[in-house]
Each structure stands twice: as structure tokens, then as C-alpha cells.
Amino acid sequence: MKDPIMRHYVPDTDWFEVSTLQKMLQTYACVYIKPDIGRKGTGIIRVKKLNDKKCEISYQQTTSLSSPDKVYSRIQKILNPNKKYIIQQGVDLATYQHRPFDVRVVLQKPLGRWRATLMSGKVAPHRSSIVTNVAKGAKDYNLYKLLKGIDQSLDSSAIMRDLMDSSHQIAQILSSHFPLEILGLDMGIDKKGKVWFIEANTKPDCIGLEKFDRRLYRKYVNAKKIMRDG
Ligand SMILES: Nc1ncnc2c1ncn2[C@@H]1O[C@H](COP(=O)(O)OP(=O)(O)O)[C@@H](O)[C@H]1O
Ligand SMILES: [Mg+2]
């Protein structure tokens, strides 16, 4: 977060505590609470501020209402006491057929340069879904086709360029701190078209992406081969 480029793309984030919850809910209409070390969209909670008197807490398939002063204790009951959690500004994700989606960009570093080798959109199963993980029922889509058909009227070519630029910048920055050769970035696009960096996976799961974009998949397999042989 000290890096100005990174700060531009990462939603406002802090450790989850009573004070940060209050502060975030004063600033943002929606916040996410997520395990520090998590995967597959498990254990994630979304809190939406409906008005001054009511918040909506969503977890797994359930949604309940709470007064703002009770939100912290309600959430505490859901959290795993052995885990640390972060709280994050919620991104109002763009939708496809009324369902939120985010973007997976896989980057590899064959021959010393980062290349985006796979891209897909992950569309949540329901309009009320709080996560877009394939493990939670989201479906993979060809990103070009998806962006052309989204519900918001946004410039899909400009978004593609932003996604590519930001992904390369993020890979560069992360790999200056960690020894990385492959990254699976979860990138969000909000309803106004701004690109956000949600998460980096260092062991991305790429199986299943083959069927809807063979050209890209070949690029991914080739890069893998160069890295293995090289
Ligand atoms: N700040 C956020 N705003 C909006 N949606 C989010 C936010 N954080 C996570 N999500 C949703 O939850 C999903 C899972 O979150 P992520 O941080 O990638 O954790 P995991 O490691 O479990 O995949 C994301 O793909 C996205 O759909
Ligand atoms: Mg993820």
C-alpha cells in the first residue's frame, strides 16, 4: 500500500476491528470482511449500510438486518476465532445479466518478462451473490464477449486496456517484493468502469479455461513450457 500505483488499484483496506469497522461504515456504503489467509471465497462477509438505522449483513446464502451498533458483535459470532481478518471498501461490481462478475488475469514470466497469458470473466450465479469464485458457483466467460454484453454502458476497449496496464504494473510491483513466476490476479470492474485489484493468487487454477479461449490457453501452455525448460 506504500506504492502509489498499488494504492490506486487496491480498495481501502485495514485489519478488522471494532474501530475500523465503524470508520469504514462511515466512509463506504458497502464493506467486505475477509480472512487474511483465505481461498475459494470461503468465510467472506459483506455489510451494506442501508440507512442510518439499518445494515444488511450477508454471509454464505443468508442475509440479515442489524442496527449499526450491533453489526460488530453479529459479525464476531460468524468469524473463526483462530483467523485474522481484514476489512475492505466494497467495490460495486459491474454486472452481466444482472449478476456481478470479476476478472481473472493470469500472468507468467517466461524469459524475464511478465505476459498476460489467460483472461476470463467470472460471473456469479445470482444477482445477490457476494463472491464470484468458481468454487462458489460462478461461471467462466470469454472476457471480450462478456465486456461487450455487460449491463452498464461502458467502453469495453478502454476497460481491456486498463486491465492489461494495471495487471502488468501489479505483477511488476509484486515480483519486486516476492519471487514470483506466475500470478492469478482477481480484478474487479466497478459500475463506473474503474478497475480494482482484489487479490493475487500465487498458484492459480487454470484448468477449465481451455475450452472457451483456445488461443489464449496455448499461450499459457507455451509460457509454462519455456519456464520449465528454461
Ligand atoms: N472489496 C471487495 N469488493 C467487492 N467484491 C469483493 C471484494 N473483495 C472480495 N470480493 C468478492 O469476493 C471474491 C473473493 O474474494 P478474494 O479476496 O478473491 O478471496 P478468495 O481468496 O477467497 O478468493 C472476489 O472474487 C469478489 O467477487
Ligand atoms: Mg479470489
Image: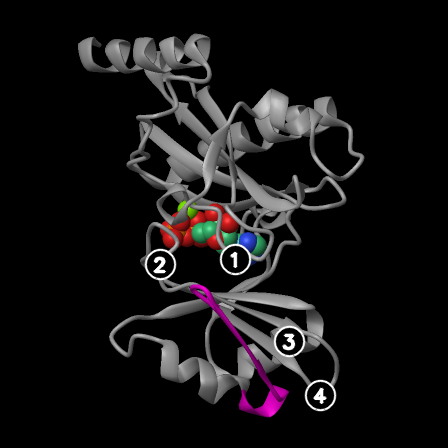
Q: Earlier in the sequence, mark 1 or mark 4?
A: 4
Residue contact at pointers 3 and 2, CB within 8 angstroms = no
Amino acid of disc 4: Lys
**Residue at disc 2, secondary structure:** loop
Please indicate whether residue 50 sits to the left or right of residue 179 in the image: right
Closer to the N terminus: mark 3 or mark 2? 3
Mark 3 vs ligand 1: CB under 8 Å? no
In the foreground, 109 or 225: 225
**Above or below, 215 relative to 128:** above
Q: Quadrant of the C terminus?
A: top left
Q: Which residue is mark 2?
A: 42
Does the Cβ of the disc 1 residue fall within 8 Å of ligand 1?
yes
Q: Please say if 76 is above or below 8.
A: below
Magenta highlight range? 59-70
- Name the front one of labels 4 and 3: 4
Q: Residues within 10 Å of mark 4 (few under 14, many from 20)?
A: few
Mark 3 or mark 1: name the one nearer the start of the chain: 3
Q: Nearer the viewer, mark 3 or mark 1?
A: 1
Q: Mark 3 sits on what residue?
A: 25
Q: Which residue is mark 1?
A: 130
- Mark 2: is the Cβ under 8 angstroms from ligand 1? yes
Q: In the picture, residue 61 is in which quadrant?
A: bottom left
Q: Is residue 101 above or below residue 49?
A: above
How packed mark 3 is, by other alpha carbons closer than 10 Å (few <14, some 14-19, many 20 or more), is some
- Amino acid type assigned to the residue bearing label 2 in the image: Thr
Where 207 sits versus 55, above or below?
above
Label 4, label 3: how far apart the Cα atoms are: 12 Å
Label 4 or label 3, whichever comes before in sequence order: 3
Q: Secondary structure at mark 4?
A: loop
- Look at 33% across and 12% down and name the residue there: 223
Amino acid beneath label 1 = Ile
